């Protein structure tokens, strides 16, 4: 649990080695690419290699040091070839000059990147089982819950080594949650790093990959049209995405006599922030505070998804066909890192393929000046060139109508499912017609050498993951079903997003309305994703649909920044324009700044000194596969810190994974309250140790004298007693 300095160094070296291998491959195969893109793609490649290479070996020899050693050995030829190549073709002095020149050209990016990453590292430092002098572990507000689940996956995978892994909080059930977001830390923990260091290190790189991609994607979209304002477009995109926040700050202003919240509540309450205020239906949380920091699957999923989208966009619309293969490999690694990211990648890729086929098949609409232009023909021409306003109007009308019918109880989940799938079915039919027309004109070669390679990567590498892990869990029920408006708790549809997204909605709506064929690849996929996210949910937790919607929001931020610069060029000479720009930026980021300020100073004790001492003893003195009887508390030190199995964990985690815990919870009560009469249950779950603490005493009626007389008491830490089953 605590690791050693030597272990931290060894684990970090192993991780950085794979980063080096990934960058080596990219520097070899994309020699004409610029420096920062090379670093980004190479880093993502290294992260995926580090995540995936031990997995095939783990099926045969377990998730242990042998599988990681084998993963290391198969990369050695890449290292040898790269060293030989660079020694022959690129002297070190010449490469160093290129490297420094590349850094100097992008010095503004590196300054922004440095400040952003310092803040991110500060959050990770204060939120990741931070120990105090008494041995207690502390965390922040947003990581107080989910971190316990992720720690249980990390420690059990590293200590038990069983593969495919099972839930340590429900042994006997295969772990179908996208656990590769945690296996990266399990690998470091296995190699000797402390649990805290193993948890933090990969998250630093993942966030760096996300930030760099947002910056570069914005540079690609905006810089393609206006080089002089590319930096402004990058900055605006980063502000809109990373500092997303709506109008929630209004609820903390003392402007009514019946004000229930005060400004100080932001920094003292638990989840009373301007971007996460459930009592007032503020649900559009800040991506840094409430998505990337606590939700590792989302962080690592977006860390691969965003670069994959950027590469695919360039391959499809900037004629960089060499990136189809890399984008396909990145997408294929997503299912067991973050399933929502893989779903988003599939939707966006399909829409981009549709647009690509449409452009290849349909000539540009240019009305002839020799033909008389009727009003109807003129309207059709406008809609063809700028269909965004019409599409948005239809979208909003459908959503408002569904909400109205739902209040009248005229909409069922089955109907919502059909409506949700209808758009994709109609588009698929249209896309099939475009495909047939394209093949008739141009044949297979161009399609197969680009999109065919991308699809082949997904079919060969991603489909087995879905068949082995994902589809089995989804088939249990409660996952895919019709559901409207994911998190809205009673507000009118339009007002819900006005107050949750806030000022950026002006640029988003304006950009969609002004959207033509050139901006269609940016604005059209988010509408498909939003349609999907509003009508169909994919887990028992409907709130999880925001993981799809934030991908759509990222693309909308790109388009909004592009449109915002157009707007700026038209209004920059008007009096008062600077005031309006400053007011817009303030309203856009104020709520998120308050939320991040609150998150930065939040501090909660997650594990007491007696809990950490017990976990350390269990880790050192008990078999890795031992099963412990504890209650179902969410901060379970046995599962999270020692990596041992417990009979049943909390529904806060298991219910939303589609698992029924009712039988096990009933058995828990019987084993605690009448242990001698139910020794068969101890055999059923292979329980070898029993923990009795204040938490168990408060939930069950325990006669501890029975345990003292008939079980073997091993030790006591504070109010915690550990017994061995006879």
Image (spheres, rainbow, N blue to C red):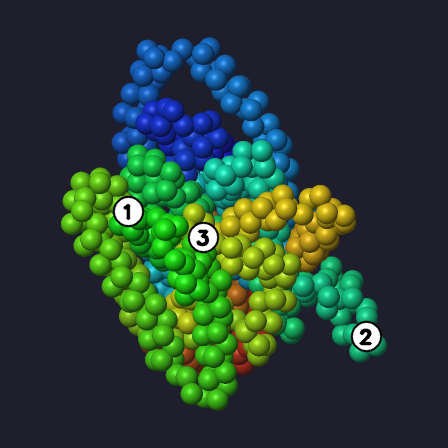
Q: Does residue 311 sit above or below 355 in this rendering?
A: above
How far apart are labels 1 and 3 at the CA level?
Answer: 16 Å
Q: Nearer the viewer, residue 24 or 696?
A: 24
Q: Residues within 10 Å of mark 1 (few under 14, many from 20)?
A: some
Quadrant location, the C terminus: bottom left
Q: Earlier in the sequence, mark 3 or mark 2?
A: 2
Q: Quadrant of residue 73?
A: top left
| Image side of residue 561 versus residue 32, left or right | right
Q: Earlier in the sequence, mark 1 or mark 3?
A: 1
| Image side of residue 393 versus residue 357, left or right | right
Which residue is the site of mark 1? 360
How far apart are labels 3 and 2 at the CA level?
Answer: 45 Å
Percent x, y for residue 415?
36, 80
State whether residue 661 appears in this view: no
Tell me what residue is drawn at x 59 percent, y 55 percent.
507
The number of discs equals 3
Q: Nearer the viewer, residue 702 or 558?
A: 558
């Amino acid at each position: 649990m605590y690791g050693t300095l030597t272990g931290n160094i060894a684990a970090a070296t192993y991780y950085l080695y794979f980063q080096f291998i990934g960058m080596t491959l990219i520097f070899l195969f994309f020699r004409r690419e610029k420096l920062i893109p090379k670093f980004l793609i190479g880093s993502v490649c290294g992260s995926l290699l580090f995540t995936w290479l031990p997995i095939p070996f783990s099926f045969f020899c377990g998730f242990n040091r042998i599988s990681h050693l084998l993963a290391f050995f198969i990369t050695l030829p890449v290292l040898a070839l790269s060293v030989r190549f660079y020694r022959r073709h690129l002297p070190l002095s010449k490469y160093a000059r290129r490297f420094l020149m590349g850094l100097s050209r992008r010095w503004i990016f590196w300054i922004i990147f440095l400040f952003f990453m310092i803040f991110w590292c500060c959050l990770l430092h204060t939120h990741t089982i931070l120990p105090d002098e008494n041995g207690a572990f502390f965390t922040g507000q947003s990581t107080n819950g989910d971190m316990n689940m992720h720690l249980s996956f990390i420690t059990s995978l590293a200590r038990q080594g069983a593969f495919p892994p099972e839930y340590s909080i429900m042994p006997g059930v295969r772990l179908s949650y996208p656990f590769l977001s945690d296996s990266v830390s399990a690998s470091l923990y296995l190699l000797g790093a402390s649990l805290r260091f193993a948890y933090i290190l990969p998250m630093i790189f993942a966030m760096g990959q996300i930030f760099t991609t947002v910056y570069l994607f914005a540079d690609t979209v905006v810089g393609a049209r206006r080089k002089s304002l590319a930096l402004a477009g990058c900055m605006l995109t980063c502000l809109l995405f990373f500092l997303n926040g709506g109008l929630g700050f209004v609820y903390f202003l003392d402007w009514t006599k019946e004000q229930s919240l005060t400004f100080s509540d932001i920094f003292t309450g638990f989840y009373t922030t301007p971007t996460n205020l459930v009592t007032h239906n503020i649900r559009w949380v800040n991506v840094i505070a409430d998505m990337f920091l606590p939700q590792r699957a989302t962080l690592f999923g977006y860390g691969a998804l965003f670069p994959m989208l950027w590469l695919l966009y360039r391959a499809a619309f900037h004629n960089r066909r060499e990136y189809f293969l890399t984008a396909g490999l990145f997408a294929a690694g997503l299912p067991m890192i973050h399933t929502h990211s893989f779903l988003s990648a599939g939707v966006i890729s399909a829409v981009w393929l549709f647009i690509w086929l449409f452009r290849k098949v349909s000539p540009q609409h240019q009305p002839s000046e020799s033909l008389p232009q009727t009003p109807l023909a003129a309207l059709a021409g406008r809609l063809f060139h700028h269909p965004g306003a019409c599409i948005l109007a239809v979208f909003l009308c459908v959503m408002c109508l569904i909400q109205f019918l739902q209040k009248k109880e005229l909409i069922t989940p089955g109907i919502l499912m059909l409506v949700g799938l209808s758009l994709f079915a109609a588009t698929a039919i249209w896309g099939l017609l475009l495909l047939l027309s394209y093949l008739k004109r141009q044949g297979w070669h161009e399609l197969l050498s680009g999109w065919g390679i991308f699809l082949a990567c997904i079919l060969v590498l991603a489909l087995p993951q879905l068949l082995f892990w994902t589809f089995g869990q989804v088939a249990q029920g409660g996952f895919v079903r019709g559901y409207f408006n994911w998190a809205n708790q009673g507000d009118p549809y339009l007002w819900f997003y006005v107050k949750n997204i806030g000022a950026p909605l002006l640029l988003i709506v304006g950009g969609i309305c002004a959207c033509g064929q050139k901006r269609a690849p940016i604005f059209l996929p988010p509408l498909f994703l939003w349609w999907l996210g509003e009508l169909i949910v994919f887990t028992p937790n409907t709130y999880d649909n925001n993981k799809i919607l934030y991908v759509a929001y990222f693309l909308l931020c790109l388009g909004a920044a592009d449109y915002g610069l157009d707007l700026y060029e038209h209004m920059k000479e008007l009096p008062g324009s600077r005031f309006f720009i400053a007011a817009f930026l303030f309203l856009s980021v104020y709520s998120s700044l308050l939320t991040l300020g609150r998150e930065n100073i939040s501090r909660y004790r997650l594990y007491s000194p007696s809990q950490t001492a017990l976990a350390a003893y269990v880790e050192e003195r008990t078999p890795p596969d031992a099963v412990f009887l504890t209650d179902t508390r969410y901060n379970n030190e046995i599962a999270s810190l020692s990596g041992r199995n417990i009979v049943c964990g909390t529904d806060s985690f298991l219910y939303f994974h589609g698992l029924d815990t009712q039988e096990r919870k009933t058995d828990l009560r019987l084993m605690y309250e009448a242990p001698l009469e139910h020794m068969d249950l101890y055999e059923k779950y292979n329980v070898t140790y029993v923990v009795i603490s204040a938490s168990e005493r408060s939930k069950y009626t325990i006669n501890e004298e029975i345990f003292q007389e008939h079980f073997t008491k091993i030790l006591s830490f504070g109010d915690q007693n550990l017994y061995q089953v006879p």
